[in-house]
Image (spheres, rainbow, N blue to C red):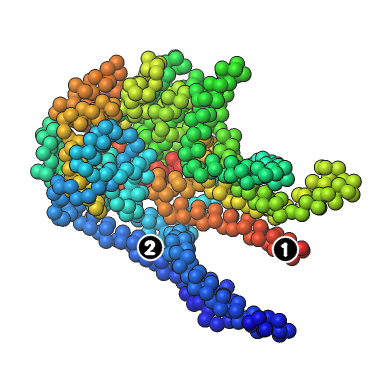
């Protein structure tokens, strides 16, 4: 071996080694792949098939080949729910970016030896279930909850209606998913060569211009990743709207939940799910293509 | 799945093809489960009398318990676990439809607490086990007491269910916040409580509320009636704070001044939850209120029906009935619980529900599939708009 590596013609050896490596990895991949197929891909296939079905006489879903469920979605109410979800999710992404970027920036560039502790402090609250944290907020923000009691105590206000408003839904989504923005941005800032910022300063850029001309482009991949990671769950979420929302904050996730549980119309719920998945796929493809382009450029 | 046996790299296309194939296989298995509907519905239509022998009341494992949250006194549950040395594995639902969805998708539970309408549906779909009354030592607490429950409309001869609670849906309000209540369902459209009104998040209850206000049948499936109901519900929407079944917390948290509410939940609120019960009142609107009763039942696919029977028998002990009536605030149609209910409902006569009330019209019944779909679609549009 030692001799062959020093050999000028090393290529065949390396190919053989990597081939056997690949085969090993292929076999190691089998159990997780089987798991994903059995429980993930199969359920997606069932959902897609069901979306062409209808509800049987006993209330059970029956498979079919009709586009009636999709036709039913082409309706003002459903479209407005879809639009509302997109608006809430976009606002959430924007807020997460405005909050997440400075936090990641501060930790990555000024965290010093506390960096890891600060990241841990950010992550730990997310060990508690999202549902539990949403319940906690609904208690805290209620009209006679702690926040309003505090406002009254300090004489700041007679009480503010936080709960059951669109703002509460977006705030809930932001709180729930902001970590998905912080972590990828933090990772890309960590990877960035700090000499670039120095160079920006050396070229007489002010701090703002350095940020927009150097730092932000260098962390574009992290930002895009964060945007996607926040957008996907926010668009499909129903918990925030259910626990913090009001009568007019129904999101597409609520609509799907309503069809599967309350109305027991699984075929219609499936059609909604398929449409949502297609929309998410569009964002996903956009993301993959733009990161691909970026990789090729660099 | 084809794994590459030679060649330098895993061929992505092969991998995906194999993966999809595997996924399709698993999906087929899933369809098989769903296709079982045909046989289930066939046996349901061929007379609901399943001839499987009813279970015996002997402990045959831990109890898998499926109920509304806090819909039995926790002390009673603790007592059962201690006395019989079994665990109660608890799962909750937040509406009857979600309970039905989980039952019909094949989840296994040993004991459930369906409302009367759900019992009728579950029995018709052969989803319940017959309960042999001879296995219940305390059966005389609830059977042979009221003719209504010896042969109720939802379950002939009460063969598949045991009566549990009786309830009424009315309006709860804050006396310190709202002074203009008329005693009618119009109070749910009371503009002086705008932004502080909650409607129960259940299709039947919301439709029933609007139907009674408009003088219509709460079980209506007529397109004209449903259009009028939809209009009323949409007109109410700007006044609402939300749709929710979490009535106790909404009232206690101060978000609700007027709440479409179940009678027992109201008593639970004033007796156990708030510090200033004098500020809360419950009214049973003059147009009439939806009425109903809940039951204990054992799903057909229960893994431990013996433990479930022992549990139901334990719940029928007079002392446990009294504890539950006191905790829940709902009356039960049993021999000796009237005193406990009188005590817990003192000062709130509107919360009383009698067996005679149940004989009257306003009970939610099962609709035809088309009728149910029309009601659900209308309700979805109201909520989504």
* Residues packed near mark 1 inside 10 Å, few (<14), some (14 to 19) or many (20 plus): few
* Residue A249 picture location, percent across and down: 54, 38
Q: Are marks 2 and 1 in contact (CB under 8 Å)?
A: no
**Chain letter for the residue marked with disc 2 in the picture:** B
In the image, is B347 to the left or to the right of B207? left
Q: Quadrant of the N terminus of chain A?
A: bottom right
* Residue A43 picture location, percent across and down: 44, 60
Which disc is residue A295 wearing?
1
Q: Is residue B120 visible?
A: no
Which disc is residue A245 wearing?
none
Residue at 63%, 42% (x, y): give it. A118
Q: How many marks?
A: 2
Between B109 and B90, the one nearer to me in the picture: B90
Residue most toward the front? A2
Are the numbered discs 2 and 1 placed on the same chain, yes or no?
A: no
Q: In the rendered image, which quarter is residue A147 located in?
A: top right
Q: Secondary structure at mark 2?
A: helix
**Chain letter for the residue marked with disc 1 in the picture:** A
Between A124 and B117, the one nearer to me in the picture: A124
- Mark 2, mark 1: which one is toward the viewer? 1
Residue most toward the right? A204
Q: Is residue A292 above or below residue B165?
A: below
- Read off the residue under disc 2: B30
Residue at 52%, 33% (x, y): give it. A137
In the image, is B132 to the left or to the right of A133? left
Q: Secondary structure at mark 1?
A: helix
């Amino acid at each position: 071996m030692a001799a062959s590596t020093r050999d000028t013609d090393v290529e065949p050896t390396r190919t053989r080694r990597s081939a056997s490596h690949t085969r090993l990895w292929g076999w190691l991949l089998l159990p997780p792949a089987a798991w994903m197929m059995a429980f993930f891909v199969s359920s997606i296939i069932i959902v897609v098939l069901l979306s062409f079905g209808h509800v049987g006489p006993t209330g059970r879903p029956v498979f079919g080949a009709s586009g009636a469920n999709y036709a039913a979605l082409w309706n003002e109410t459903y479209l407005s729910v879809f639009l509302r979800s997109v608006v809430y999710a976009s606002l959430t992404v924007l807020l997460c970016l405005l909050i997440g970027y400075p936090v990641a920036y501060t930790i990555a560039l000024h965290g010093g030896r506390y960096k890891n502790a600060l990241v841990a402090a950010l992550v730990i609250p997310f060990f508690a279930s999202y549902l539990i944290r949403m319940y906690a907020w609904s208690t805290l923000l209620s009209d006679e909850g702690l926040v309003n009691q505090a406002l009254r105590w300090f004489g700041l206000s007679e009480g503010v209606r936080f709960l059951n408003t669109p703002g509460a839904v977006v705030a809930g989504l932001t709180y729930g998913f902001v970590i998905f923005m912080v972590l990828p941005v933090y990772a890309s800032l960590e990877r960035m060569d700090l000499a670039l910022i120095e160079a920006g300063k050396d070229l007489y850029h002010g701090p703002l211009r350095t940020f927009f001309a150097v730092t932000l482009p260098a962390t574009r991949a992290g930002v895009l990743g964060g945007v996607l990671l926040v957008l996907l769950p926010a668009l499909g979420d129903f918990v925030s709207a259910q626990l913090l929302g009001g009568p007019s904050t129904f999101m597409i996730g609520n609509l799907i939940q309503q069809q599967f549980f309350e109305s027991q119309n699984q075929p219609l719920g499936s059609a909604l799910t398929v449409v949502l998945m297609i929309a998410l796929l569009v964002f996903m493809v956009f993301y993959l293509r733009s990161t691909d382009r970026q990789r090729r450029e660099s | 799945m084809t794994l590459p046996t030679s060649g330098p790299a895993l061929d992505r296309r092969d991998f995906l093809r194999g993966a999809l194939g595997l996924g399709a296989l698993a999906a087929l298995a899933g369809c098989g489960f769903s296709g079982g509907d045909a046989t289930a519905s066939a046996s349901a239509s061929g007379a609901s009398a399943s001839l499987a022998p009813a279970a015996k009341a002997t402990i045959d494992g831990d109890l898998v318990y499926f109920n509304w949250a806090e819909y039995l006194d926790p002390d009673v549950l603790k007592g059962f676990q201690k006395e019989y040395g079994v665990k109660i594995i608890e799962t909750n639902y937040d509406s009857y439809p979600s309970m039905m969805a989980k039952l019909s998708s094949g989840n296994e539970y040993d004991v459930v607490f369906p409302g009367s309408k759900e019992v009728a549906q579950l029995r018709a779909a052969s989803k319940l086990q017959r309960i042999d009354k001879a296995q219940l030592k305390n059966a005389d607490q609830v059977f042979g007491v009221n003719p209504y429950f010896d042969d109720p409309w939802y379950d002939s001869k009460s063969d598949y269910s045991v009566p549990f609670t009786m309830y009424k849906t009315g309006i709860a309000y804050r006396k310190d916040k709202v002074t203009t209540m008329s005693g009618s369902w119009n109070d749910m459209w009371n503009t002086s409580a705008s932004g502080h009104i909650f409607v129960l998040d259940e299709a039947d209850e919301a439709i029933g509320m609007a139907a009674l206000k408009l003088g219509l049948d709460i079980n209506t499936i007529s397109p004209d009636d449903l259009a009028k109901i939809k209009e009323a519900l949409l007109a109410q929407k700007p006044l609402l704070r939300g749709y929710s079944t979490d009535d106790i917390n909404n009232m206690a948290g101060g978000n609700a001044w007027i709440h479409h509410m179940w009678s027992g939940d109201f008593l639970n609120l004033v007796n156990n939850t708030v510090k200033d019960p004098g500020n809360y009142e419950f009214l049973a609107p003059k147009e009439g209120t939806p009425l109903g009763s809940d039951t204990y039942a054992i799903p057909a696919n229960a893994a431990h029906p013996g433990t479930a029977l022992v549990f139901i028998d334990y719940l029928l002990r007079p002392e446990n009935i009294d504890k539950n009536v006191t905790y829940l605030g709902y009356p039960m149609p049993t021999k000796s619980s009237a005193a406990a209910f009188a005590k817990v409902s003192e000062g709130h006569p509107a919360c009383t529900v009698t067996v005679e009330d149940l004989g009257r019209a306003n009970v939610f019944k099962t609709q035809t599939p088309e009728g149910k779909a029309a009601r659900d679609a209308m309700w979805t549009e109201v909520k989504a708009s």
